[in-house]
Amino acid sequence: MIGIENNFTHRTKLNNILVSRNKIDMNKNLRYIISCLLLLMSTNPISAQKSQQLYKEPYRPQIHFTPRAHWMNDPNGMVFSKGVYHLFFQYYPDSTVWGPMHWGHATSKDLIHWQEKSIALYPDSLGYIFSGSVVADKTNTSGFGQKGTVPLVAVFTHHNMAGEKEKRNDFQNQSLAYSNDDGKTWKKYRGNPVLKNPGITDFRDPKVMWYEPQKKWIMTLATKDKITFYSSPNLKNWKEESEFGAQLGAHGGVWECPDLFTLNDNGKEVWVLTVSLNPGAPNGGSGTQYFLGKFDGKNFTTTQTNTKWIDYGPDNYAGVTWSNTGERKIFLGWMSNWLYATQVPTIKWRSAMTLPRTLKLKHVDNDIYIASTPVPELAGLSAKPITANNISVKRDYDLSSVVKNISFPCRLNVSFNKQDFALKIFNKTGEELLIGYDEKTNNYFIDRTKSGNINFNAAFAARHTAPRMSNNAVINISLLIDAASVELFADGGLSNMTEIFFPAKPFDQIHIQSAIRLNLNKLAYVEMRSIH
Ligand code: FRU
């Protein structure tokens, strides 16, 4: 995360000016608001026209969640309750750069179509509302439930700017808020903060889960360069259980936004601890590593010696899983990177989320990895696939010879016997994105060095790689391509890359390339409907 101080100073000044001006102009403002409302009511056709243009702006994702307007970063508080997926998110409703953090809110019944709701949590005297989680407190351990309701309880970090400016080391503390109307309205707990900072500058992003064997809540908290686990019977009183990771995994930057959950390995339970870190990702900047191991209600232990990453692309950060989804584990990340997130060339809003992904375990030789694949609900947006078998690619193959009208968003699946392969997505002005597999290094790659608008940050234009984990003789690649992003899922989700891009003119062509003759065993192109 960057730019806290500048933004804060700027915001404070602006707020002071606004407060004094408001006092003087109260009546004038009231009259102004009423006349605006009247005007809005009398100009329905104009607002209808506006809403048609909304979500059609250049670079506006058509199959990914974006806020209508303004700044968004991490997904927060993801919980499934009464048939509804809730997505809260780090949100600054006054600007398209990071600032005083709120929790925005959106809901969905299918993980694909989202309805943006009113802001759930506003900054208060204890600070900005940083990342955290939401649980459904089924047995009302917190006592927040009323008349038999199952309260939704948000556990989040209060980030106190004054404390940070004074260079104190205890300005991040964990707090609660609860909702008894399915997330529509929220009350902050009067006893906040519930977990006080012991003097650790980075002490944040609580992810809470119910640990059934010992009937207690477990909070997984990022504490600078490690994870600290806490437990609680009621979400209000927390006891430190253990620490993990100071000497393990990647440590190029501060640890943030952890998650702890189980995945099924042929009937056996494997505990997964995911940890985002910034910087220190394999392709620079922000990324998410994971550890597989055991958890006994107190300690997380692992025998893992290699560093494993959820996604090797540069644009999947701070991802966590939905809570209360039973055996199914669904992961969603923020589709950007702190290296350049505040500079990407979108005007009305900044940043999208990745597609939601199903997480599963897969064995490769003697090791075991997380495989992520887009949720099957995406099929609801998919047109009938256009397929072709045994395509012979000699140097260059124009996809329009099987797909008459290539359009985006779309999904493209290809399968071929392991050898060099490249796919070029481009427009007539020569801007291009190269995606492929390099046999010599056994890496997948995405090259966005010529992808259009690249000058907003020196770190953006680059060729990124992901190691191939699978040793199958056949390579399967599935690409989900939207207006300004591509998500690559190779070998059933064992190697993944997520990248954003900003061509001056939308891409509209796809060619497949190979230096030597390549036989594509199978190809499927799926046009996708917009979610808007
Ligand atoms: C991760 C992060 C979190 C923090 C939030 C602030 O991107 O830095 O650690 O809670 O963003 O917006």
Image (cartoon, rainbow, N blue to C red):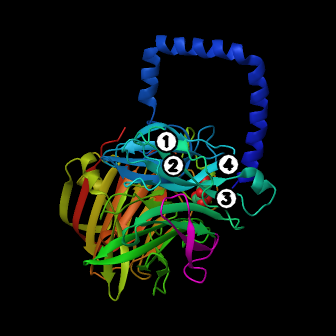
Residue 172: image tag: 3
Question: Marks 4 and 1: which is nearer the front?
Answer: 4
Q: Marks 4/1: CA distance?
A: 23 Å
Residue 428: % across, % down = 44, 48
Residue 110: % across, % down = 30, 47
The residue lying at 78 percent from left, 45 percent from top is 9
Is 487 rendered above or below residue 352?
Answer: below
The residue lying at 39 percent from left, 80 percent from top is 439
Residue 214 is one of the magenta-drawn residues:
no
Instruction: Tell which circle, 2 or 3, labels the residue nearer the N-terminal end.
Output: 2
Range of residues picked out in magenta: 224-253
Instruction: Say whether mark 1 is within 8 Å of ligand 1.
Output: no
Mark 4 vs 1: CB contact within 8 A = no
Q: Marks 4/2: CA distance?
A: 16 Å
Disc 2: which residue: 89
**Which SS class for mark 1?**
loop
Q: Residue 179 or 316: which is nearer the viewer? A: 179
**Which SS class for mark 4?**
loop
Mark 2 Cα-neighbour bin, 10 Å: few <14, some 14–19, many ≥20 = many
Residue 14: % across, % down = 76, 35
Q: Residue 401 or 122: which is nearer the viewer? A: 122
The residue lying at 40 percent from left, 56 percent from top is 425
Residue 50: % across, % down = 46, 25
Indicate the quadrant where residue 460 lies.
Answer: bottom right
Q: Residue 306 or 519: which is nearer the viewer? A: 306
Mark 2 vs 1: CB contact within 8 A = yes
Res 116 seen here: yes
Question: Marks 2 and 3: which is nearer the front?
Answer: 3
Disc 1: which residue: 67
Disc 4: which residue: 127
Res 505 seen here: no
